[in-house]
Image (spheres, helix red, strand yellow):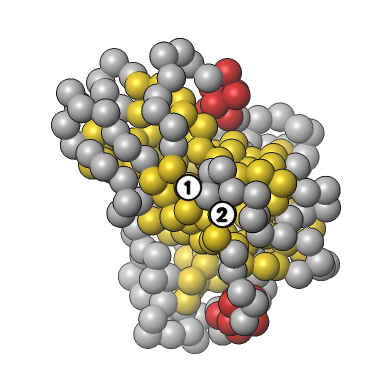
Amino acid sequence: MTHPLARPLALAACLALTPLTAGAQSGDLPPGLVSARLLPGWTDAEGNRILALDLQLAPGWKTYWRSPGDTGLPPQFDWQGAGNLDSVTLHWPAPQAIRSGEVLEMGYHDRLILPFTARATDPDQPVDIRAQIDLGLCENICVPAFLDLRAPPAGGATDPAIARALAAEPMRLDLHPACTVTPLADGLRVAMALPPGEATLAAIELTGHPQIWVSGAEIAQTPEGAQAVVEMVGPTAAPFDLDPAALRLTVIPADGARATEMTGCAPTG
């Protein structure tokens, strides 16, 4: 597992490159992107916009999931240029296994359609969506990219491409896998039991605590079965209190079945 100091250093190296700005109609795209736009989507019965970020990646390029692992660059969204917008919920399709050097991480290649729900401040008025997005685009090395995109007006019907991406979210299971939390000199080690069946990848997130660094998950075989194991380091670089209900486990099966997601765990030991 990469120590948390390595990630800022890798990011600093990437940021030494000059990010490029891309608009929905611009041909001036960052390296690795063939096209970038916001799909207009539709308005639901409650007045919310259902729309999506649509990225077409060049062959051999990839971008990262919300919790990519030790070295990936997760996308960051700024919605301040939007109008009549109360809140946004991102609906992440199950990530793919992507190779970064000798490490498998979580992300997307070829095309990413990332749906989101934009809730209106005033449901009787349209929501105007503008997003400024920082993301990593990677071939052999990662390049930071900046996109400034505005959505066209909402359409009148469900977009099949967005609907397929929504259906590709991990299946949420009402399960609380066994977990163990072990203090380390600079934080915690967390192990969560994986469901039966071989897993290609797994991720453990600590929701609601962005200040806590979480490593990519290693899959360990134990007498009790397979476990996903991560290390967590907080701002104090010391052990800290952890709420098991805030842990989220995502599992990508090796057999191509639908990914699963579980929130909360049952501490043991």
Across and down, in percent, residue 65 comes to 59, 51
Across and down, in percent, residue 208 comes to 34, 57
The label on residue 149 is: 1
Q: Judge whether residue 219 can be spotted in this image.
A: no
Across and down, in percent, residue 258 comes to 65, 30
Q: Is residue 114 above or below residue 57?
A: above
| Other residues around mark 2 within 10 Å, as few (<14) / some (14–19) / many (≥20) | many
The three-letter code of the residue at mark 2 reads Ala
Give the residue at x 26% y 28%: 126
Q: Quadrant of the N terminus?
A: bottom right
Give the residue at x 38% y 56%: 78
Q: Nearer the viewer, residue 148 or 143?
A: 148
Quarter of the figure with residue 170: top right
Query: In the visual, does 66 lie left or right of 137?
Result: left
Find numbered disc 2 in the image and state the secondary structure of the residue it sits on.
strand
Q: Nearer the viewer, residue 205 or 175?
A: 205
Name the residue beneath numbered marker 2: 22
Give the residue at x 51% y 38%: 38
Query: In the visual, does 93 lie left or right of 181?
Result: right
Give the residue at x 33% y 70%: 241
> Gap between marks 1 and 2, in whole Å?
7 Å
> Given contact means CB atoms under 8 Å apart, are the residues at marks 1 and 2 in contact?
yes
Extreme residue in the top direction? 157
Q: Is residue 91 above or below residue 61?
A: above
| Other residues around mark 1 within 10 Å, as few (<14) / some (14–19) / many (≥20) | many
Q: Nearer the viewer, residue 169 or 135?
A: 135
